[in-house]
Image (tube, rainbow, N blue to C red):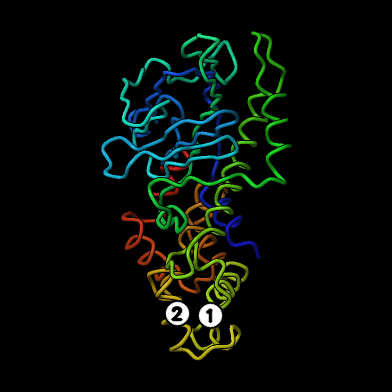
Amino acid sequence: MDVLSDVLLAVRLTGAVYFDIDARAPFVAQSPPTDVIAAKVAADADHLIAFHVLTSGACWVEAVDEPEPAELMRAGEIVIFSSGEANILASEPGMRGQADLSRYYRPLSEALPFVIDINSDARAERCRIVCGYLACDRGPFNPLLESLPRMVRAPVSGRSWEWMTSLLDAAIATSDERDAGQEAMLAKLSELMFLEALRSHIDGLPPQTRSWVAGLRDRDVGAALRLMHGRFAEPWTLEQLAREVGLSRSALAERFTSYVGIPPMTYLARWRLQLAARLLQSRSLSVAQAAAAVGYQSESAFNRAFKRQVGEAPGVWRRRGTTT
């Protein structure tokens, strides 16, 4: 079981490439907080993650209103703002601009991305930036989103960079004529780039890091996560899970909690509710059927757990989701 892929599917990650920016120094491009533009660019999104891929040149990147200093970003890197903060890409650190909210909308008569030129001085240093958004569900339970830092800057692996840039160049036309399916191809490419950045981020975490993503690479915590994700409907007990992982109950509980922040059985319960929430919204299942599908023997127990975690009854959640 690939736990990371399983989570990305369950939280309905979908991407879109919005801007192809050709910038020459001096330049500054400021992006607004994603909650300000979410209704315009992805009306059905529960949460928007902003990302920028630098395909050539170098620039400085930073979150607006955050104390961390600007970081130098080079070609072959992607930066992700997982919480959707306002952010800046600029030719020099400390520069500020003004986000143009009129640029954020879903075009009806043309295909994404929008091509933007900033400063046409051919003698100045050139930077090409591909920018977009990834929509996902924040709740009922998104362990990935909860464990990521506000800003992730990571290199795209060398084995993937060549084919990614080739696809980008093929998909982003400089003329007004866009091929059929181009926007969909870029959307899938943005999801692949996001996954590449996550892998690089996980690989580069210091050994002492404690988080859900760090737990994926830990032998024991990773094994427990794979078992629970792969066999989520089974009537797991801590004792059974520990036995299959090869640890004592106390050792597994302590190690798992130190990484993930919650005990294994609490994690399993929340993950089951995340899966049930998706089943209720995407398929013609009754509440009882959804409860049984994720391992609940009692519909009443499922109702209580769902309302406690989500804040509303599963029937209400189902009706609201299927009518939007």
Residue 189's quadrant in the figure?
Answer: top right
The reply, left or right, for residue 180 in relation to residue 96 is right
In the image, what residue occupies the spot 43% across and 52% down?
A: 145
Query: How far from the left and from the top, in percent, is residue 135?
Result: 48, 39
Amino acid beneath label 1: Trp
Q: Are marks 2 and 1 in contact (CB under 8 Å)?
A: no
Query: How far is the residue under mark 2 from the one under mark 1?
Result: 18 Å
Query: How far from the left and from the top, in percent, is residue 201?
Result: 52, 54
Quick one: label 2 or label 1, which is nearer the N terminus? 1
- Work out whether residue 15 or residue 89 is closer to the camera in this orientation and state it: 89
In this rendering, the count of numbered labels is: 2
The reply, left or right, for residue 97 in relation to residue 255 is left
On-image quarter of the C terminus: top left
Pointer 2: what residue?
Answer: 255
- Residue furthest bottom as drawn: 248
Please identify, in this view, whether the residue under mark 2 or under mark 1 is nearer the observer: 2
The reply, left or right, for residue 190 in relation to residue 264 is right
The residue carrying pointer 2 sits among few (fewer than 14), some (14 to 19) or many (20 or more) residues within 10 Å by Cα, namely some
Query: How far from the left and from the top, in percent, is residue 266?
Result: 41, 72
Residue 147's quadrant in the figure?
Answer: bottom left
In the image, what residue occupies the spot 57% across and 21% down?
A: 113
Q: Is residue 183 above or below residue 47?
A: above
In the image, what residue occupies the spot 47% across and 54% down?
A: 277
For label 2, the SS is helix
Q: Is residue 20 above or below residue 267?
A: above
In the image, what residue occupies the spot 58% across and 51% down?
A: 9
Pointer 1: what residue?
Answer: 236
For label 1, the SS is loop
Amino acid beneath label 2: Arg
On-image quarter of the N terminus: bottom right
Query: How far from the left and from the top, in percent, is residue 274?
Result: 47, 58
